[in-house]
Amino acid sequence: MVTAASDTIDRVVGLETGADDYIAKPFEPRELLARVKSVLRRATGTGVARAAGPCVRMGRRVLDLERRVLVEAVGGREENLTASAFDLLRVFAENPNRPLMRDWLLEVTAHRDMDAFDRAIDLRVTRLRRKIEADPAHPEAIRTVRGVGYMFVPPKE
């Protein structure tokens, strides 16, 4: 809330009625910007200074769709992605909580049809899990859907 009311009771009522933060006029623009960034960090659940472009939280990492990099949620270290890894993560990000068939994933990311014993998607998913999952042996972000393929499950935080 940005308001002219600066009494303590006004601040308390504002925060109790649902405001994430409260700043009284007159205020310094830099302070307002810092408070907005702080609220955005809390809302996304990351300590990462977010880029201007769209970002998607995936496991312990954040996928920056504009810059095509994975960023550690804690620490902010960036990791460049191969084109195929980025394409696969982007498809998952665009289809959260939807089971995606293995052959369709291969078709849209590699632009080819799947052979009967083709395990290329499984190998890519295994590599991505190593990058984004806290425990790749027990994946939470990219889950296997038996008989179908894989599903991206965004974190609940």
Image (cartoon, rainbow, N blue to C red):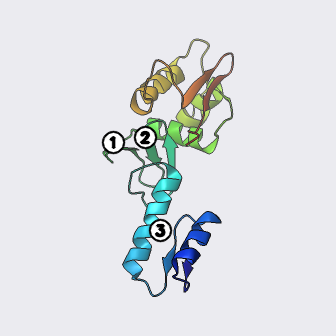
Q: Is residue 157 left or right of residue 49?
A: right
The residue tagged with tag 2: helix, strand or loop? strand
Please say if 109 is above or below 25.
above
**Can residue 52 be seen from the camera position used here?**
no
Q: Nearer the viewer, residue 33 or 141?
A: 33
Residue, disc 3: 36
Q: Position of residue 18 (x, y in %)?
A: 63, 63
Residue type at mark 1: give it.
Answer: Glu
The quarter of the picture where the N terminus appears is bottom right
Task: Using the rendered view, name the quadrant where residue 157 is placed.
Answer: top right
Q: Is residue 43 left or right of residue 60?
A: right
Q: Earlier in the sequence, mark 3 or mark 1?
A: 3
Q: Nearer the viewer, mark 3 or mark 1?
A: 3
The CA span between labels 3 and 1 is: 27 Å
Question: Which is nearer the eye, 3 or 88?
Answer: 3
The crowding category of the residue bearing disc 1, from other C-alpha atoms within 10 Å (few below 14, some 14 to 19, many at least 20), is: some
Which residue, given by chain and number where applicable, does mark 2 sit on? Answer: 61
| Amino acid identity at mark 2 | Arg
Q: Label 2, label 3: how many angstroms apart (C-alpha)? A: 22 Å
> Where's residue 19, x and y in %?
59, 66
Residue that numbered label 1 is attached to: 79
